[in-house]
Image (cartoon, rainbow, N blue to C red):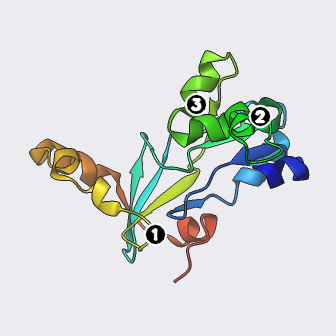
Amino acid sequence: MVRAGELQPDFVMIMDADDLVSNQIVQYANVHKESNGWMLKQGYIYEYGSQWINYTEHFSCGSNSIVSSKLIQFPEDLSEQSINNCIILRWGHTIICEKLAELRTPLSPLPFIGAVYILNHGENDSSLCTSSERYWHGVRYFLAKMRRIRPLTRRVKTDFSMHG
């Protein structure tokens, strides 16, 4: 974040190693520079190596928000005070959307699918997402999940730079 402040970006997006983002985000942000930023509400969950992808309207991953630099006090160093003054470092991806809304600078929903959360590729703890508590909800859950599964198309691969 110190380096980002030196570069003076229009927006900042925190990224996780197990996420891919849409190649449409930069162009969209360049057209909407007056925005506070966006939260990624819809996305894909992808099991590494699969030919299928799971669409969700309740997307939750580490790369879930894009924040305007006008809302960020970039740290000049890594001191505790500088870190606490930087909203992204202080709040992180888990509650930043909620905290910005409380400050009356809410993020808008990104109007397209913005990211893919990849499971079981070695850079995450995918077991957190496959617990029986979360995934075992009987026949209703299975049928709802089947409606969200889609083939991994060439367009999705291109939009998210998925090679292989």
Q: Can residue 110 be seen in this view?
A: no
Residue at x 80%, y 40% (from the top left corner): 74
Q: Mark 1 points at which residue?
A: 123
Q: Name the residue under label 2.
A: 72
Residue type beneath disc 2: Ile
Q: Looking at the image, which is closer to me, 103 or 106?
A: 103
Q: Quadrant of residue 84?
A: top right
The first of marks 1 and 3 along the sequence is 3
The first of marks 1 and 2 along the sequence is 2
Q: What x and y, as percent, mark residue 95? A: 52, 32
Q: Quadrant of residue 83?
A: top right
Q: Looking at the image, which is closer to me, 125 or 10?
A: 125
- 104 lies above or below 57: above
Residue at x 80%, y 38% (from the top left corner): 69
Q: Do the residues labelled 1 and 3 touch (CB within 8 Å)?
A: no
- 146 lies above or below 69: below
Q: Looking at the image, which is closer to me, 122 or 84?
A: 84
Q: Is residue 87 visible?
A: yes
